[in-house]
Every structure is written in C-alpha cells, then in structure tokens.
Image: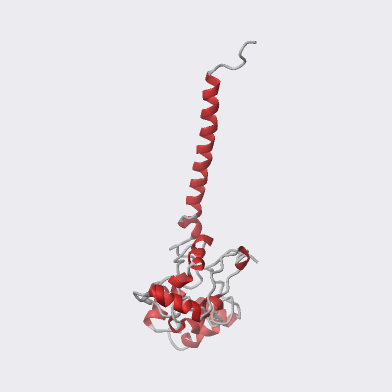
C-alpha cells in the first residue's frame, strides 16, 4: 500500500503541536503581565475626584487621625467615607471662600453627597472586613501605603488575591501592636519574627487561606 502522507508531514505535525503549546504559553504569560500591570491594577494612578483632597496636608500637616474621617474602620467591614458635614466642621471656618472647595459647600447646600471615586477597592465577589484586620494588628499603611505622604490619594498595592495571600499565609511578618495600627511610618523591630509570633498568639490570629474566607 502506498504511503498516504509524505515523511515531512511528521515534522510539520511536531512543529504545529509544539508551536501551539509555546503560543498558548506565551499568550498566558502576556495576559498575566497585563493583569498585574498598572493599567489593570491602577497602582500609583491618580483617580479623578470631585475635590483634590490631600491626605498629606490633613494627616501629616495637620495631624488629623484616620478615624476622624473614617469613623467605622474599627467596628465595620467598611472604613466609611466622611459625610460633607465632617468636612464642613472645619471648612465652615477656614478656606470658606476657596473656589476649590465649592463642590463641598454645594454638597452641603444641596444636601447631595459628593461622588468620590473609590481608590482602594476589591471586586464585589471578595469579602473584606476592615475591623477584623485593624483589631488583629494590621496597620493601615500595610494595605494603603504611606497615605500621610500622598498629596492625591493613589492605590499603593494591587490588592489582588496573591498579594493578600502573602499576609494570610504568614501574618506574623506584618502584624504590629494594636496601638501602632494607625501609625504612619511604623518601623518593625529587628526581632519582628519573634514579636510577630507573640502577637499572633496574643491576638488569636489564624492563617486563613481557605477560599471561603474571602469568597462567600
């Protein structure tokens, strides 16, 4: 019986199969790179806001505590966005005629909330509770970065699953005393490994890496 295919067909088949595998691998690599890029994660990207609020001025310059504006961060899953009344408690007395603050005055005058753009956000299918992390000794800057040095708020970390898991797998390396949770520029001690292990036991911190911990 005559040979149906030419012997070179075997080479073509190998090239096609292996070429397809390499092409698929390259495509996965490119998609992974895009998924971790600033274009997707928005890390260090300034988002448009109704008012150019400076955390650097209010936190570092004026010494305002995080909890003055984010009132529910210790008791709720949501840190809380300050109502206009909180802003106007100061700005009804200072910078009262500033054009930059007109949207704030209009918000109070019209009884209409300012529509802030969420900078640090996770997908709707992810459950995150601020109060649990705060009360377990995880500092604000661990996730949000040096907010006290940000003239305009930007996202400091990706907040993607793999980034979160680095802490969930070994929380001791990030944990700090509860009284230092709101401290910006906190310096971990040289013996953080021992301190972290002690605080993990003291605060009853568990290494939660099961899917249902965040995906409920």
Q: Is residue 172 above or below residue 62?
A: above
**Picture quarter containing residue 10?**
top right
Question: In this orientation, which residue lies closer to the viewer: 53 or 121?
Answer: 121
Q: Observer-nearest residue: 124 or 49?
A: 124
User: Which quarter of the figure is the N terminus placed in?
Assistant: top right
Picture coordinates of residue 215, whole percent (x, y): 62, 65
Type of colouring: secondary structure
Q: Nearer the viewer, residue 88 or 42?
A: 42
Q: Is residue 79 visible?
A: no
**Vertical placement of residue 148 versus 11, above or below:** below
Spot the residue most to the left: 190
x 50%, y 38%: residue? 22
**Residue beneath the point at 38% across and 73% down:** 149
Looking at the rendering, in which quadrant would you find the C terminus? bottom right
Please state the horizontal and vertical placement of residue 79, each as a whole percent of the image.
55, 77
Q: Residue furthest top?
A: 1
* Residue occupying the point 48% across, 71% down: 171
Q: Residue at x 48, y 75 (%)?
A: 138
The picture places residue 91, in percent across and down from the top left corner, at: 47, 85
Q: Is residue 3 placed above or below 21 in the rendered structure?
A: above
User: Compared with residue 22, is residue 5 higher up or lower down, i.e. above or below?
Assistant: above
Residue 74 seen anywhere in this rendered image of the structure: yes
């Amino acid at each position: 019986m005559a040979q149906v295919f030419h012997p070179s067909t075997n080479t073509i088949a190998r090239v096609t199969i292996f070429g397809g595998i390499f092409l698929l691998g390259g495509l996965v690599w490119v998609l992974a790179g895009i998924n971790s890029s600033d274009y997707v994660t928005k890390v260090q990207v300034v988002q448009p806001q109704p008012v150019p609020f400076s955390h650097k001025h209010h936190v570092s310059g004026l010494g305002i505590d995080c909890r003055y504006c984010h009132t529910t961060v210790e008791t709720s899953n949501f840190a809380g966005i300050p109502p206009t009344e909180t802003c106007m408690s100061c700005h009804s007395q200072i910078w009262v005629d500033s054009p930059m603050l007109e949207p704030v005055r209009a918000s109070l005058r019209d009884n209409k909330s300012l529509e802030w753009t969420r900078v640090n956000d996770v997908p709707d299918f992810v459950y995150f509770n601020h109060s649990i992390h705060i009360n377990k000794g995880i500092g604000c800057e661990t996730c949000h970065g040096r907010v006290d040095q940000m003239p305009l708020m930007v996202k400091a970390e990706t907040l993607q699953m793999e980034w979160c898991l680095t802490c969930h797998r070994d929380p001791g390396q990030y944990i700090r005393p509860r009284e230092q949770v709101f401290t910006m520029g906190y310096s971990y001690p040289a013996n953080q490994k021992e301190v972290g292990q002690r605080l993990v036991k003291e605060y009853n911190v568990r290494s939660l890496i099961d899917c249902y911990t965040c995906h409920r």
